Image (cartoon, coloured by chain):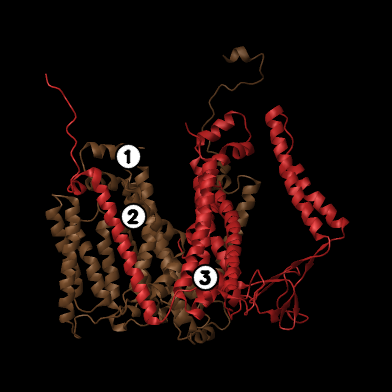
Chain colours: A brown, B red
Amino acid sequence: MSDTHQHSIAFVRDTMLPEAPPPAMETGIVKWMRENLFSGVSNSILTLAALAAVYYLLAGFLPWFLNGIWDAPSLRACREILQGDVGGCFAVLTERWNQLLFGFKYPSEEYWRPTLAFVLLFAAAAPIMFPNHVPRKLLIFSGLYPFLAYWLIWGGSILSPVFALLGFVTGYIVWNRLVKQSFAAGFFGAIIAALITWWIGGMIVEATVSDNTLLAAVPSRDMGGFMLNMILGTVCVSLSIPFGIALALGRQSDMPIIKWICVLFIEFIRGVPLITLLFVANVVLAYFLPPGTTFDLILRVIIMITMFASAYIAEVIRGGLAALPKGQYEAADSLGLDYPQAMRLIILPQALKISIPGIVNVAVGLFKDTTLVSVISMFDLVGMIRGPILASTEWNGVYWELLGFAALLFFVVCYGISQYSQWLERQLQTDHR
Amino acid sequence: MTTLSDPPRESFRLSMLINDTRYRSYTFQFIALLAVIALFAYLGSNLMQNLRDAGLNISYEFLGEPSGYDINQTLIEYDSRSSHWRASVAGILNTLLVAFLGCITATVLGVVVGVLRLSKNWLVRKLMAGYVEAFRNVPVLIWIIIIFTVMTAVLPAPSAFRGDDPARTMFLDAVAFTNRGVYVPKPVWLEGSGIVVGVFIASVIGMFAYRRYATKLLYDTGKLLPMGWPSLVILIVPTLLIFFILGRPIALDYPALKGFNFQGGIQIRGSLIALWFALAIYTGAFIAENVRAGILAVSKGQTEAAASLGLRPGRIMNLVILPQALRVIIPPVISQYLNLTKNSSLAIAVGYMDITGTLGGITLNQTGRAIETVLLLMLFYLAISLAISGVMNVYNNSVKLKER
């Protein structure tokens, strides 16, 4: 072949070149940097600007953090140790650690109780959060946990959580008996049975009230610190999911009166800020209760936040219900299932699965919003920082350490929850894509 | 042969209210209605009883009485002899002010960050992801307090600006950052300033008219007029001309240190700035995620199809991607505006006098009229929410895909 080209072209290669390594600019970190950081003029400028920003952030933060003082009785002592150097006074965290976590009134010899409740929370949440990795038997513990946690945190007579649990158990038994005849009979029968149990239990608890209980009673107004945020967050989220489902089903219902009741409730709650609802809990709700009843503030706040959260969760679940293909509803009907069966067995499992990311979003938002209770002078984490700690003579002026700590705590919890929800979404993706 | 005929219609019996699905829904609704009415009657009777016991009544007369407290930053004339009603109006305007400023800043921030999160630059992408995660996962109340602390505890007192060799100097000789707030120059409207403003408004209208005309010409005849620089010229040149011809009728009043404090200019309190920036940065992180999701929602095939039609990248973005992305982006962004407006009620934590601070704060405490004030407060926020979601529905209907 080379003969034919010899006269028209000066040179034609007829041997294979040996394999050469790629040019230095096209391999390894250099290539990566050229492609990802310096691919053009504007990109290079962006990179340099970003580097400068990172440098300034670290230059401000690192000396302050690394130079920090972790052991000192007061801000003045901190400054004496530092002698003009830049450095954080993290001693406030070690010094006031218990106050930040438990508030300033919770009896210090009982700190193990909320701590134990917090640790057990993971054991109780595990079978719900990781159903495929944790034995299902543990679900029994999850069911017992709310009563156990209540008893651990509030203390007092063990009979009250036991009777609360008994009410649910009798309700469940009655429901199980009657639901075969009709759903409505089972539902209302269960409610009546539970109410009767609680009524009897309430009388027994009052009759046997005594001072020397196993765990000393702690009044609600002594709750504080991050514990209060955790209590409000977990209680309100878990209570608001059933209410949210009911509201969403009500809003989708064919019955106009029920639909409009749900629509009005949801739109009203979603239209007002949480603070106004907390005002209601703080100053207005007492007017609407029978004269002479005293309701402690934490319970009033839980009621209002639960109402708030259930309206938002209802909207999320409504989105899930609307996203289901109509064929699913028709398939349930054609199997001859009645409304409660169709919802329980076919519609809700799918709708809830679709709504998980939205529900987690609401849960994270709600957990963040529990800081708002500091506005109505409850001493949650933010309330503790702004109130007793920053107002004390020792620690007046330690802003960044405290606020940074609060921000970090919330970040860890909220970021953890959102990562979990992304994991769960991948787990639940059973359709083929 | 058998004949089929309709089964005899059953006459209505009472048991059908429970057993027949056709009538059962009436039973349920009736029970629900009764339950709601009973609940309201119960709450209402409790309310009446409690009010009677406390010797109170429901009345809105307090709105006309003098308020007796000062509001440190108002948009309208207000002093402590003004009525509670006027205090509420001042609060409403303050709420709208911070919501307006916050929405604009959050949008700018959110769009920039959302686009940068999709950048090819690894470092910028990660930095923006860090910003979004850091702000979405920490309560907005903590951010408000942090920025408020910066404004009040870190910035110098006005006295730091005093003397021949002051510790601090004013930024560009015009803006002073102090712990009593930020002082910025204030425009002074001299004689003839109305004409300048009028000309400016006219040229804005003119610019839109020109763009409309250019689009119409393009669609009708295919002739492409330049859009960018002519609209800029129409916008700026006439206003500048008239400004200098009339001899600069709009002047600036610079803040200056007199005695212990700055005089002149506009004082923007630290509380307003803290609330404004915290809400903007917090909501901006959410908007950034919406923008990113919206751009990602436009399928890649659209870009490729546009490119295969021979469009240049800028036109692909303007004519193909953005119109489709905006349809996805706008509804969640508007609900973020709604959230921002509702979150502005956190003003009470830093002492910014919005409607929650005036009506729901001091007025409530002074008059003790909890039910009335909280009800008014809720109605105000409800009205704003309904107005914003009304706008959202109108917009949604106008951009909705016209299907079949």
Nearer the camera: disc 1 or disc 2: 2
Tell how many labels: 3
Quadrant placement of the N terminus of chain A: top right
CB contact under 8 Å: marks 1 and 2 = no
Secondary structure of the residue carrying tag 1 is loop
Q: Give the numbered dot on residue B356.
A: 3
Between marks 3 and 2, how big is the CA–CA gap?
29 Å
Mark 2: give few (<14), some (14-19) or many (20+) Cα within 10 Å: many
Residue nearest the observer in this picture, B137 or A30: B137
Task: Give the CA separation, mark 1 to mark 3.
Answer: 48 Å
In the displayed structure, would residue A15 be above or below residue A371?
above
Asked if residue A56 can be seen in this view, the reply is no
Residue A242: x, y in percent? 29, 57
Residue at the disc numbered 2: A247
Q: Label 3 amino acid?
A: Thr
Q: Nearer the viewer, residue B189 or A33?
A: B189
Give the residue type at disc 2: Leu
Q: Are marks 1 and 2 on the same chain?
A: yes
Q: Check disc 1 and give the amino acid type.
A: Asp
Does mark 3 fall on the same chain as mark 1?
no
- Residue that badge 1 annotates: A431
State which chain disc 3 sits on: B
In the rendered image, the quadrant that contains the C terminus of chain A is: top left
